[in-house]
Amino acid sequence: MTVPLADPYLLPMAALLTAIGVTEIYRLGPAGNAFRQGLWVVIGVGAFSATLFWLQSDYRVLERYKYVFGVTALCLLFLPRLPVIGEPINGARLWVHVGSLQFQPGELGKIALIVFLAAYLRERREVLAQGRLKDWGPLLVIWGAAMLLLFVTNDLGSALLYYAIFLAMLYIATARVAFVAAALGLFLVGSFAVAQGTPHVRERVTNWLSPWSTHTVFCPANGKMMLRQSCQSYQEVNSLYSLGHGGFGGTGLGHGIFTGANGQQVIPDLNTDFIYSALAQELGLIGAAALLLLYMAFVLRGFRIALAATDGFSKLLAAGLSFGFAFQTFVIVGGITRIIPLTGITLPFVSYGGSSVVANFLLVAGLLLISHRANRQEAGA
Amino acid sequence: MNKQLLHVSVAALVLLAALIVSTTYWQTWAVGDLADKQDNSIQLVSRLTVDRGQILAGGTVLATNRRHRKHGLTIFTRRYPAGDLASQVVGYATEAGTTTGLEQTLDDYLTGANTNLTNTFKEELRKLGGQTVHGDNVILTLRPAVQRLALQELAGRCGAVVALDAKTGAVLAMASSPTYNANVALQPRGIARIGRIKGTCGDASALYNNATQGLYPPGSTFKMVTAAAALDSGAYTPSSPFNDPGYCVEYGQHVSNAGNPDQNGPEAFGNVTLEQGFEHSINSVFCNVGKHIGGLEILKYAKRFGFYSLPPLDTPPNASNPSGLYKNGRLWDPKNNSQIDSGRLAFGQFSMLATPLQMALVAATIADRGMEPKPYLVQKIVAADGSTVAKTAPQMLGRVIKPQTAAELNQMMQLVVQAGTGTTAQIPGVPVAGKTGTAELGLGTIYDAWFVCFAPANNPRFVVAVVVEKQPNGFGASVSAPIAKAILEKLLGR
């Protein structure tokens, strides 16, 4: 172990979440998926070990390369928009294809963005806190970027996630509630405008507010008049049916119903975006609540590390990583349970998907490095 | 910086806690709503994988399952071995999840979803073990042989037969004609095929339970209610005198008695008592009773018998209709006597409509000395392991008329069968109490023929109500009383 003083709870929790994910992916099948996910876990652990090994002496060298991370983050976020390699799935452009390899660069972009923001905000926090008009520049740039992202990739969830991470970190760095309020207002205005202008986003909002229609509406998928729950909001509604069927105690692992009477899978994307619906049906409210408590415990440990850290960069980095982790969980599970409009994003550690697994193991590596350093300083002092 | 960190960490935890709250909502509060959605294919598959309980009556299986393997799932679909025997009562449960009749009201028991704590726990363990969920079996009070006889006697004519256990209210037969084979309802376009069954009356629906939904003018059988009001209110005694000129004067016009089959023109009996008026079903006598005590008084007693409300039966509420006055197709409850043609109401015409079950309950009340029994179809519910889940204890709905009134009515109804209009229902050695009804439909000599009776009259065990719709020259005595007699003989084991 290269980080002997690191937080002892994070890695077991990450392992448990990963195990739950692989188990459910294996259960949902086909068997190849679980094998591939297992391979990605191996790659993720490899990346995790490499990160620990390279950065064990002092991860704060990353601060020096903040603009590299910033540019990398932007590139990764806009990569799926590029022709040839970018591919739209479900109306949102999130995926990149290279040969037969498929990954979501946004997951790694998220980590890079947090590193950049931690370094940038640590450096500028005093200046930003004075709140002069010209210092609003970076804030407006990020807001513009998030809006652009939302507009060009139609990906409400990621835009919301990045913006929330940015806001949380900005608030920690500057302690200015006014910034948060202003930024929140700007986001609402901006996303309302985008929702008006983009049919895809507007549809998501309609599906969120009234997923069940009593009369038929136009279904763009086949051009017919259908009930909304049979067309646009099909996924949302069937995912809720899955939750409802699980009820309090669940059907038991392996006994959930995911196939209709016609032999077709009821919920598309069950092992990625909707793995929570599958788990909630099979494990019931008891299992789903336990899973969410596990996420809460993970986030709690993450923020403890941020509190224990002694320097601004470490604090911001740990807080950013923890908050990003929490908010990503909120975006997908909140979407499934109709707190917010549904938008496809992975459930950390559990969803099927290589880029997500690798990114989350890097996130754990970061938190472990920070906690190791903080604990070493405490022990040394 | 640490203060802000705390704020953000609290915000993050609140967001995650909100997820637990919302998940709880969908997995507890909303479960029923979600399960009821028409497009819920998960619920549909889940229903099909349950080994739905059987519905039995006597030794006869009315509903059972067929087991299939489909797309890797073991699914169960319904089968009705008794075919058309009690289709309107049992109903059907389709693969698409539509249920009617007892299949609808007893769905929770049949699917094992009824919430009994020990039961739920056992079923939950079975589910987690991946075993098939077995629903509870339902045992009905119906007697298949009597039910079969009732259908044979109706012989495809539109109408209904209801037979009750006079002491308990248990429904022993509830036959509706025309009937349908419940297995057809499960087939594609089966409901449309059943819809084409019209019966001899031309406008029947086989899906309709005539015994509880069929609204017929009760004709002279309603005189049981009028007589109950007349005697129980103290306005009359069985020996109260009347003079019958063959008609009664209503709003200045003659309302004639029913035509005499043996003579031309209406019958005229001259000086009679109320008892004789009942025995010979003299309209003018009851017309005068009605005018004297008033329509509202008659309706008050009708309501005590259960008119104007749905009978408390195990079938779905939408498979029953309340009896009462109807106006423009809707139940009508007049507020004063001037709105009612009290004379015509008294002998069951005007706009009075009643279901066969309601008329059977009137007779059962008279048989039970003025107490009305609660009708029921479900004898008991038995879990798949043989343990009893629920058992129906016979109940009384309450007192409707005084024991004295009931005894007088019982006597009058016996006279009907002994020497009055209902002699065709006589059973040698068994005193039968009954009342005929031949309801005018405004279709000339086409009538709805009624007979309502119970036997043995001195110690009533069985109540039978029969209605046969739209019979050309068909009188209660000639068409329905022989059917009632046959049913009673079967019930009495003769």
Image (cartoon, coloured by chain):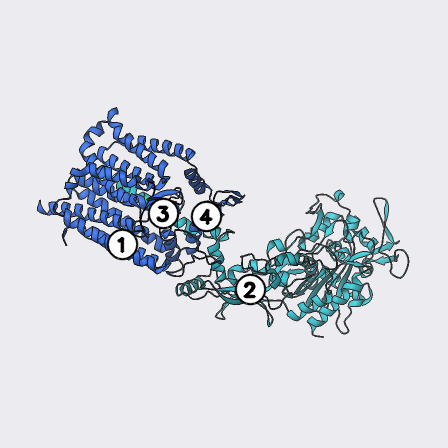
Chain colours: A blue, B cyan
Question: Which residue bears the numbered disc 1?
Answer: A40
Q: Secondary structure at mark 2?
A: strand
Q: Secondary structure at mark 4?
A: helix
Which mark is in front, 1 or 3? 1
| Other residues around mark 1 within 10 Å, as few (<14) / some (14–19) / many (≥20) | some
Tell me the number on the disc at residue A333: 3
Q: Is residue A134 above or below residue B123?
A: above
Q: Secondary structure at mark 3?
A: helix
Amino acid type, callout 1: Trp
**Residue found farthest to the top:** A133
The answer for how far apart the CA atoms under marks 1 and 3 are is 23 Å
> A141 or B31: which is nearer to us?
A141
Query: Do marks 2 and 3 both belong to one polypeptide chain?
Result: no
Tell me the quarter of the picture where residue B375 sits: bottom right
Which mark is in front, 4 or 2? 4
Question: Which residue bears the numbered disc 4?
Answer: A234
Q: Are marks 2 and 1 in contact (CB under 8 Å)?
A: no
Question: Which residue bears the numbered disc 2?
Answer: B78
